[in-house]
Image (tube, rainbow, N blue to C red):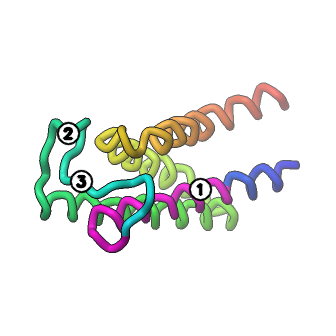
Amino acid sequence: MYRAVVIAAAVVLVLHGLIHLTGTAVYMKLAEIQGLSYKTTLVGGRWDLGERGIRVFGALWTLPAVGFVVSEVALLAGWVWWQPLLVAVALFSLVLTILDWSSAFAGALLNLVILGVVWLGPRVSTLLA
């Protein structure tokens, strides 16, 4: 049972990481993706980054993409540092998704779920043991 939960969590982390690449693709003008339009503004249109700024913002989306995949590999391998890495990646991802809330609110909510599970997971398993 425990192994199945770990594998399910790993799949969610990889998919969440890969979805970050849509931000990279759109904001760096590498691809057009239906439902995610190119723009140069964040925070509901209140902060205009301009062409260069939004490209940097798009490039930043690759960091959590890689980070979620690396944390998933570490989780499956049983390496002890998967948790601090996952927390750092989820927090960074949360900042990006909040800045682009209108397009990425679902990612922000998933980041909160990930952070909650990492924080509550050991506490719940201790109570159930």
| Residues at marks 2 and 3 touching, judged by CB atoms closer than 8 Å | yes
Under mark 2, the amino acid is: Gly
> Which mark's residue is nearer the viewer, 3 or 1?
3
The C terminus lies in quadrant: top right
Q: Toward the viewer: 67 or 41?
A: 41
Label 2 and label 3: CA atoms lie apart by 9 Å
> Which mark's residue is nearer the viewer, 1 or 2?
2
Residue 96 vertical position relative to residue 43 in the rendered view, above or below: below
**Residue at figure coordinates x 42%, y 63% from the top left:** 33
| Residue 57 rendering spot, x and y as whole percentages | 25, 58
Residue at which label 3 appears: 39
| Residues at marks 1 and 2 touching, judged by CB atoms closer than 8 Å | no
Res 117 quadrant in image: top right
Residue at which label 2 appears: 45
Q: Residues within 10 Å of mark 3 (few under 14, many from 20)?
A: some
**Residue at figure coordinates x 29%, y 41% from the top left:** 99
Under mark 1, the amino acid is: Leu
Residue at which label 1 appears: 13
Q: Which residues are magenta?
A: 10-31
Q: Toward the viewer: 107 or 124?
A: 107
| Residue 64 rendering spot, x and y as whole percentages | 42, 58
